[in-house]
Amino acid sequence: ISACLVGSEMCIRDSLIYSERMPVRALARVNLAAIERNVGVLRGALTAGASLCAVVKADGYGHGAAHSARAALSGGATWLAVATAAEALELRDAGLGAPILVMGAISDEELPVALAARADLVAWSEQFVNRVRGAAGEQPVAVHVKFDTGMGRLGTRDTGEAMRVAALAATARGVRLAGAMTHFATADDDLEFVAAQLKLFAPFAAALRDRYPGIVVHAANSAATLRVPASHYDLVRCGIAIYGCDPMGFDPAAVGLEPALELSSYVAAVKGARAGDSAGYGRRFLAASETCIGTVPIGYGDGVRRALSNNCDVLIGGRRYPLVGTVSMDNVTVDLGPGTDVQPGVRAVLIGADGDERQTAEEVARRIGTINYEVTCGISARVPRSYHRDGEPVG
């Protein structure tokens, strides 16, 4: 124990010097080349004629919307999709000119923002089409009719109503019928229900295509893109997969995807602990024997979920160490073992690779009973994002 204590004291000065060089206490590094390659993998899975829409809502699932969108377009995507009008306008303000689909509901207050962003909108009622018509300027607003085949959220379940919405969008001044769509509820799991949804959607899509040639038909999300070729139609909407996360929640490498994001911090302090010493709020960790505890300055204020208390690993020096004690807002503690050689200032990885070890967003998600989407989206704005292409910095 004394060796650990002396060692930590000896390293404090080096740690402070190192921290002055560190740009931040926590960092999410995003490899844009990985996003480009993931888009290439997904495009390679498409049936003939289908194009790829990159979904960059929720700040690109935590990766940064504008940077991710540019990388996806560079990789061969031709459309972008978001959830809100403000997200669409953010992309336009960043200089992106690709078609943008706003997939979410649009309030009266948001409608002018969506129109300013020149975004395509989703409609499932004649009332909404009339609202768009009333707000439209000289440029017709493109509308995609959403038929709810089983997701049970937005969209109409009534085929007749969906056809009437399409007819109004096709004829109303200031509105243009651009597409028809649905969304799958279980493409990552239950393919029988996907088949049932397709059975409902196929005749609707065929009828609209016959009546309105040139519309874009789309249904597939990331999981369906990889698992259900019959769902590709004219366009697929890929979100989680373009960031290199497995839409089925297992292993990205198994489906040819490469995680684009690494979440890291550094070891700020190392100190000895005797048997019975605790670490963190609530004393939820008690050392069973003499050991060394490292403190890493990242916590739930940065998106490291409190449920990971005593329930995660941290990669340091190419090795796994258990996260012990309660995750606090700004710090976590790690059991480094007795007589550790870990020095203050070294990198600590919570998501990503270090040497031969890696910890994916999927692994973190499984530990706390959630999904990889929530893990990456949950990385807070307090954590800066930096961008590179296979190690080469991108401004």
Image: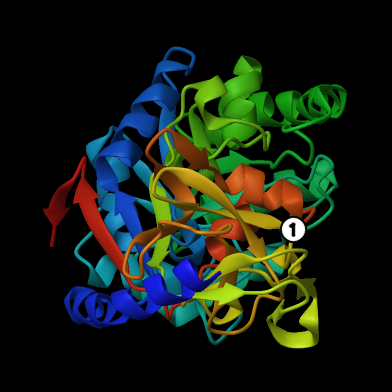
Where residue 379 appears, as percent x and y from the top left, is: 51, 68
Kindly identify the residue that appears in the image at 47 percent across and 76 percent down: 5
Quadrant where the image shows the N terminus = bottom right
Q: Is residue 164 left or right of residue 109?
A: right
Q: Quadrant of the C terminus?
A: bottom left
Question: How many other residues sit within 10 Å of disc 1, few (<14), some (14-19) or many (≥20)?
Answer: some
Q: Tell me residue 367's x, y (percent).
A: 74, 51
Q: Nearer the viewer, residue 206 or 321?
A: 321
Q: Is residue 265 above or below residue 23?
A: above
Locate residue 66: give its quadrant. bottom left
Residue under the image location 54 percent in, 47 percent down? 320
Depth order, front residue of 344/349? 344
State how the image is colored.
Answer: rainbow
* Residue type highlighted by circle 1: Leu
Which residue: 74% across, 58% down?
154
Residue 336 is at least partly visible in this image? yes
Which residue in the protein does label 1 denote?
A: 154
Asked which quadrant contains residue 35, the reply is top left
The residue most toward the top is 48
Does the rendering let one see residue 166? no
Identify which residue, 264 or 181, lies in the foreground. Answer: 264
Instruction: Give the percent coordinates (x, y) of residue 252.
Output: 54, 31
Up-down relation of residue 200 to residue 7 (above or below): above
Vertical order, 330 against 388 (above or below): below
On screen, residue 36 versus residue 248, left or right, reads: left
Provide the secondary structure element on which disc 1 rests: loop
Q: Position of residue 72 (x, y in %)?
A: 32, 42
Q: Residue 33 occupies which quadrant of the picture? A: top left
